[in-house]
Amino acid sequence: MNVPILSDLAAQGKNPEVLFWVGCAGSFDDRAQRVTRAFVHILNHLNINYAVLGPEESCTGDPAKRAGNEFLFQMMAMNNIQVLNAYEVKTIITTCPHCFNTFKNEYPALGGHYEVIHHSTYLQQLIAAGKLRVQGGPFAGKKITWHDSCYLGRANEVYDAPREIIQALDADLVEMKRCRKNGLCCGAGGAQMFKEPEKGTKDINIERTEEALGTQAEIIAVGCPFCNTMLTDGTKHFEQNDQVQVKDLAELVVEGLPEIKA
Amino acid sequence: MVYLSSVLFALVLGASAFFFARSIGRVRRNITLGRKVKLDTSLATMMRVALGQSKMVVRPVPAVLHLCVYLGFLVINIEVIEIVIDGLLGTHRVLSMLGGLYDVITAAAEVFFVLVMAATVTFLIRRNVIKVKRFQSREMSKWPRLDANIILWTEIVLITALVVMNAADQALQRMGHAHYPETGAFPITAHLVPLFMGMDAGTLVILERAAWWFHIVGILLFLNYIPYSKHFHIMMAFPNTYFTPKRAKGHFPVNERVKQEVTLMLDPSQPAPEDTGEPATFGVKDVFDLSRKSLMDAYTCTECGRCTSQCPANLTGKALSPRKVMMDTRDRMESVGRVKDANKGQWVDDGKTLHDLISREELWACTSCNACVEACPVNINPLDIILQMRQYLVMEQSQAPEALMVMFSNIENNGAPWPIPATDRFNWANAQ
């Protein structure tokens, strides 16, 4: 797959318009890698002037911060800022709401000032501007429910962009009872992704998946690699993973690209 | 006689004001136990959220009931102003000089007698008969439940006093009693007047005066109860929403103490930071390390439990309850205050911290999803406290769950939370 790396471009004296920050999940997690490739496919398809950091990328420090390790967070952040500022990065796009949130809100106090865009907003803007044309074919009339990620929704009030993408795909957007401001967490936030849950009566992802399945949607759309994992696990728990798919917005858009259709 | 009653009233009013001012002084002192932080201010937020109750509408049934009590409180307070003036000057229904407007005020107050009464009775039923789930959690122990019932019963009793007062007054008005000139409009209590018409004027005057005194003394006692009660929200909601942070909910501010250390570590040539008077602790060990805003949050909490009922951890049976975090913070702040009072204003270590009230099991169950922050009708932020307490556990005590410790070392060594070498980071581009 053809992916421009920032250091290569810089060596040629080029400075791309946007940096695609892949993130740890997008780089290492098998499922999230597929989302990364889908998003890169869209960027390439539209000839966007972008690059990734590649091997120079590192953890934003967000999971450490949420778990109370502010030291480690700031060490990671300051190192990342050094790299990003050296390349004079102005705009960062991420497919992870956690990377998005910390870049946007927490990096400025440490000297990292960037325009930060989550891929849901980025794709929605491209569609609205007429640059990205999607066909509803594969989704026409299909029920899709959107799971609001905490760090995209409540944390940063991005509620409409993902919904507009789903509607642009001619899909039948069905809402869960707990949506938008009242959206229920998938259970992975606050560094829960990296530990076992505390003693309780139920796992949070089961509670949320139950609600998503209750909408009768054929696809649960997400915009976060951790939500993706949690809800996919949930559909497996209910043995619904054959009937109901958990998909990232980038994957839905790729399927909606006219050229891709078989 | 009139003179004597005015003096007595002034004494009662003065004593009540004195004790109330002392309570406010105590609250102020306790809030200032916390760290001074730069606060955002927003009059618009206060008007919308506190005055306009915009976040109550999410739950329509309690919202309507609460609105009845809230508006009733405002309207009936006009009558309290009248009672205070009457009490001090020896006048009777002094605001009747407003003429037609007085009819509007008294009539509106009477309508609210019914609405407030209906709402408070419904609230009592919701808490004690229907047992609405969010009032039954573990932290709703004996005192919080009693506190809620005291508030509701007090409101019922105080309104009843006003009903008796108005009815007796009208009976006297109809008798043409010299001290009770015809005034006001009483669409509700007018129906009760026949019950009082059989009494002689002397008895009615005693009844009217007794109800009057009972009501105002009751109000003044209640006023002094409020700063010890969850009901304090009727005052604290205003400053607390006024000082709502403007940052995005996902923005958990950079810890400045840590920033000093990290800056120095990455660039040792930097001059050592000056002593800013910031506490030496990383994260929150006790109420002293919390911001004054968090402590104000704790006093503002009226234990409605909307936060806890929306908390994904609590919903799935975990020990965490954001409401308990706020109640524990307030309880700890009050105990610290009592220790100071007992030691001439000096803090003497009592061997306890906030961590004795809020357990690690609770702190580690949080998903930082902000549902509690969103749910709070008065913009309290339990998440801020939880995350800062985690900072203390991790940075001062190395007490994170084992899996998180592993995650930390992965980030440190591989630049990723998983044990995958950093050199593999770009492999995704080659896979299919």
Image: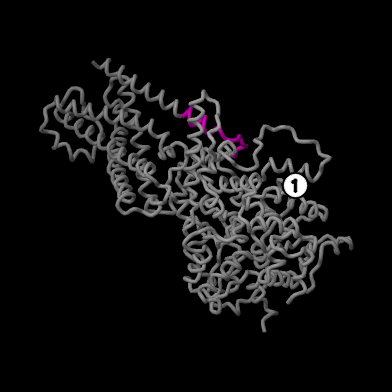
Farthest-out residue, right: A12
Q: Place residue B428 in its image quadrant.
A: bottom right
Bounds of the magenta segment:
B24-40
Q: Which residue is mark 1?
A: A111
Relative height, residue A192 to residue B289 (above, below): below
The colouring scheme, among rainbow, by chain, secondary structure or one colour, is: one colour
Q: Assign the N terminus of chain B to one quadrant of the image.
A: top left
Instruction: Name the spot of residue B425 as percent of width and height, x first.
Output: 76, 66
Instruction: Name the spot of residue A134 as percent of width and height, x first.
Output: 65, 74
Q: In the visual, does A150 lie left or right of B183?
A: right
Q: Which residue is at a point 48% across and 74% down the rendered structure image?
A: A216
Q: Place residue B42 in its image quadrant.
A: top right
Q: Which residue is at a point 67% across and 53% down the rendered structure image?
A: A64
Going by the numbered disc 1, the residue's amino acid type is Gly
Q: Which residue is at a point 42% across and 50% down the rendered structure image?
A: B138
Relative height, residue B122 to residue B227 (above, below): below
Q: Place residue A97 in its image quadrant.
A: bottom right
Secondary structure type for disc 1: loop
Q: Is residue A251 magenta?
A: no
Which one is nearer the viewer's eye here, B103 or B69?
A: B69
Which one is nearer the viewer's eye here, A227 or A179?
A: A227
Instruction: Name the spot of residue B370 as percent of width and height, x first.
Output: 55, 53
Q: In the visual, does B377 lie left or right of A41?
A: left
Q: In the visual, does A41 lie left or right of B31?
A: right
Farthest-out residue, bottom: A262
Q: Is residue B100 visible?
A: yes
